Image: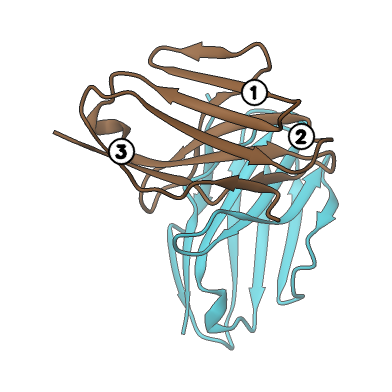
Chain colours: A brown, B cyan
């Protein structure tokens, strides 16, 4: 079983749609959780950290369920510029960031 | 400012060449990282430096040799690489070992 699992997609949505990504992780000792965004042939960029209480940044909402070892990202009112690969990332107890394979999002006009 | 810089942007080298990748950050971060990313795959951790000391080596072949000359700089020395080593090499830094990591733009390496 992979340490971090994501649906690779692609998710094809129209502008203005709401889309949700899910991720599961296997190491219950994992300490911190993140969503990164990666555009084609670019570096990963931090989108947001994820907390058990849930956190929101504009159109983006992230949620962590430690009991189920499940992380989610909700994007509301999708924009063309949201098209990218979204990486679910977990910091293990060994200073290591473990990346999911990424979920590809394509937003169309 | 969360900028990590990497040079060169692109590098083409033969299997007998010796080259170095460079990474720099001026955010006062105490942990620095090298990752390798193949096309359509997530980044894979290679090395972690914490307070200028190597703390993690993910069983990387010895043809890759990291060096941390000071708290702002991280190098990756390359020697006798194979074509399968062609990839995007990403550097990252974080305030501490458990902090959020910020990535540089990467060096796209092609080994002929």
Say whether residue A87 is left or right of residue A66: left
Which is more foreground, mark 1 or mark 2? 1
**Circle 1 marks a residue in which chain?**
A
Q: Which residue is mark 3?
A: A83
Q: Position of residue A78 (x, y in %)?
A: 28, 25
The answer for how far apart the CA atoms under marks 2 and 3 are is: 33 Å
Residue B98 versus residue B63 in the image, above or below: above
Picture residue at 78% right of the left edge, 61% below the top = B58
Task: Tell me which corner region of the image, top left, top right, bottom left or bottom right, holds residue B24.
Answer: top right
Q: Nearer the viewer, residue A8 or B68?
A: A8
Picture residue at 36% right of the left edge, 41% below the top = A84
Q: Are marks 1 and 3 in contact (CB under 8 Å)?
A: no
- Name the outermost residue toward the bottom: B16
Residue B107 versus residue B5 in the image, above or below: below
Q: Position of residue A47 (x, y in %)?
A: 49, 28
Question: Mark 3 or mark 1, which is nearer the start of the sequence?
Answer: 1
The answer for how far apart the CA atoms under marks 1 and 2 are is: 27 Å
Q: What label sits on residue A32 in the rendered view?
A: none
**Circle 3 marks a residue in which chain?**
A
Picture residue at 73% right of the left edge, 61% below the top = B66
Q: Position of residue B88 (x, y in %)?
A: 50, 61
Q: Nearer the viewer, residue A7 or B45?
A: A7
Q: Which residue is mark 1?
A: A64
Q: Which residue is mark 2?
A: B30
User: In this rendering, do the residues under marks 1 and 2 share a single chain?
Assistant: no
Q: Are marks 1 and 2 in contact (CB under 8 Å)?
A: no
Q: Position of residue A44 (x, y in %)?
A: 49, 42
Which is more foreground, mark 2 or mark 3? 3
Task: Find numbered disc 1 in the image and state the secondary structure of the residue it sits on.
Answer: strand
Which is more foreground, mark 1 or mark 3? 1
Q: Can you say which quadrant of the picture contains the C terminus of chain A?
A: top left
Task: Tell me which corner region of the image, top left, top right, bottom left or bottom right, holds residue A83.
Answer: top left
């Amino acid at each position: 079983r992979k340490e971090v699992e994501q649906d690779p997609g692609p998710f094809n949505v129209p502008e203005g749609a709401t889309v949700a990504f899910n991720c599961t992780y296997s190491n219950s000792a994992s300490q911190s959780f993140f969503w990164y965004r990666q555009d084609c042939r670019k570096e990963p960029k931090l989108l947001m950290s994820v907390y058990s209480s849930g956190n929101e940044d504009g159109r983006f909402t992230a949620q962590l369920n430690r009991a189920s070892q499940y992380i989610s990202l909700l994007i509301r009112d999708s924009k063309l510029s949201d098209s990218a690969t979204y990486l679910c990332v977990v910091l293990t107890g060994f200073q290591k960031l473990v990346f999911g394979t990424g979920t590809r999002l394509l937003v169309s006009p | 400012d969360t900028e990590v810089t990497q040079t060169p942007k692109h590098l083409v080298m033969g299997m007998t060449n010796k080259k170095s990748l460079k990474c720099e950050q001026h955010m006062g971060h105490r942990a620095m990282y090298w990752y390798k990313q193949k096309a359509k795959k997530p980044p894979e951790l290679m090395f972690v430096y914490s307070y200028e000391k190597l703390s993690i080596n993910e069983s990387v072949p010895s043809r890759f040799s990291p060096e941390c000359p000071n708290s702002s700089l991280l190098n990756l020395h390359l020697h006798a690489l194979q074509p399968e080593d062609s990839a995007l090499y990403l550097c990252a830094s974080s305030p501490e070992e458990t902090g959020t990591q910020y990535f540089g733009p990467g060096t796209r390496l092609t080994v002929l």
